Amino acid sequence: MKFPHQVVLITGASSGIGAELAVQLARMGCRLGLLARREELLKQVAERVEAAGGKACIAVCDVGDAAQVAEATRRVEAALGPIDCVVANAGMGWARKRLEFDAAATEQLVRTNFLGMTNAFFAALPVMLARKRGHLVAVASLAGYQGLPQDAGYAASKAAMRIHCEGMRIELRGTGIDVSTICPGFIRTPLTDRNEFDMPFLLEVEAATRKLVRAIGKRRRVYNYPWQLWWLIKLGMHTPRWLYDAILGGQGAKMQAGRTQKYSNGLDPRS
Ligand SMILES: NC(=O)c1ccc[n+]([C@@H]2O[C@H](COP(=O)([O-])OP(=O)(O)OC[C@H]3O[C@@H](n4cnc5c(N)ncnc54)[C@H](OP(=O)(O)O)[C@@H]3O)[C@@H](O)[C@H]2O)c1
């Protein structure tokens, strides 16, 4: 498949899906803007990108800070040229204990996952609108379709991404700018390494990212995968709430067994 974009900005490019996406797109000859907070890891991904035949520009920033993202986007444009595609992939999770609700951690989740996406999109949009072309891609999650015990904040942040993208997609009709929402199930990355429960239909990151690249290439409006988990989620959405609550309540107890409080990337969102 020929990938339709040349300059791609990826947020959350220092690990997991973002790092793998950068390397796969480099093999297709793309020039890549790589954003995240951990500079050392970004440098390593940039080396892999260059070794794979691509060109990389790294920009350290916190996606939750609109000014930092705008500055990073300008730096990428200056180094690589106008951005054809933004993949808003940066994200975090928080495996908290049952009944331990936390306002600061929830704010951090929403700031990173949801506002991190809008910050990246809005920074690139003016140039895309002027060029009358572009592609905005959000890496949301199948978790964003229903409420999940102990992951309510994560699921809500992903639902917000999905709904915001739907509105933008319709609003941007006729401007030459496409919007894609990607909703993966479980993928083996540092984000899911913390999970102590069974992850049904878990995908390896290389295979999962190949599917993501194909979906972007086809400019899919919404791409939910793997299909097996998507069908289970659809079944769940049509299940009476009393039954859904009972099933997920049991699942929540299983998830709780032996669970310790952990944060993806080892960063405590409340620090
Ligand atoms: N793995 C799965 O099963 C799965 C399933 C569905 C959706 N997703 C979504 O896929 C995306 C990538 O996740 P992953 O599985 O690849 O996890 P990961 O390996 O933990 O990667 C997360 C990336 O986001 C970056 N990030 C986190 N907070 C940031 C911030 N405040 N500012 C800038 N960058 C930040 C991290 O970089 P730094 O820490 O260096 O900043 C890292 O590069 C996330 O949005 C996640 O919700 C994952």
Image: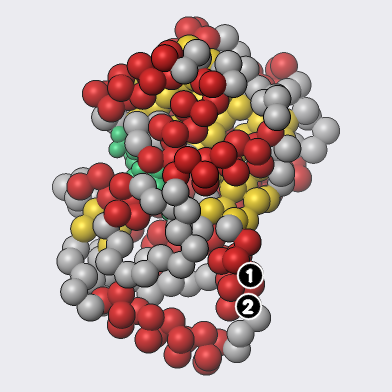
Coloring scheme used: secondary structure
Q: In which quarter of the image is residue 65?
A: top left
In the rendered structure, the answer to whether residue 112 lies left or right of residue 76 reads left
Instruction: Please tell me which residue is depicted at 47% across the width and 40% down the height of the picture.
Output: 206
| x then y, percent, for residue 246 | 45, 90
Dot 1 falls on a residue whose secondary structure is helix
Q: Would residue 159 be visible to someone looking at this image?
A: no
Vertical placement of residue 31 versus 161, above or below: above
Instruction: Please tell me which residue is depicted at 37% across the width and 86% down the height of the picture.
Output: 250
Q: Are marks 1 and 2 in contact (CB under 8 Å)?
A: yes
Q: Which residue is nearer to you in this view: 41 or 108?
A: 41
Q: Tell me the quadrant of the picture where the N terminus can be found.
A: top right
Q: Which residue is nearer to you in this view: 105 or 218?
A: 218
Task: Give the distance between the C-alpha atoms of the residues marked 1 and 2, in whole angstroms.
Answer: 6 Å
| Number of numbered labels in the structure image | 2
Q: Does label 2 point to a residue whose CB lies under 8 Å from ligand 1?
A: no
Vertical placement of residue 179 versus 28, above or below: below
Mark 2: few, some, or many residues within 10 Å (few <14, many ≥20)? Answer: few
Vertical placement of residue 14 versus 90, above or below: above
Dot 2 falls on a residue whose secondary structure is helix
Tag 2: amino acid = Leu
| x then y, percent, for residue 100 | 23, 72
Q: Which residue is nearer to you in this view: 54 or 149?
A: 54
| x then y, percent, for residue 115 | 45, 43
Instruction: Please tell me which residue is depicted at 58% across the width and 71% down the height of the picture.
Output: 233
Tag 1: amino acid = Trp
Q: Read off the residue under disc 1.
A: 231
Instruction: Please tell me which residue is depicted at 71% across the width and 44% down the height of the picture.
Output: 220
Q: Quadrant of ligand 1?
A: top left
| x then y, percent, for residue 217 | 69, 33
In the rendered structure, the answer to whether residue 244 lies left or right of residue 222 reads left
The label on residue 235 is 2
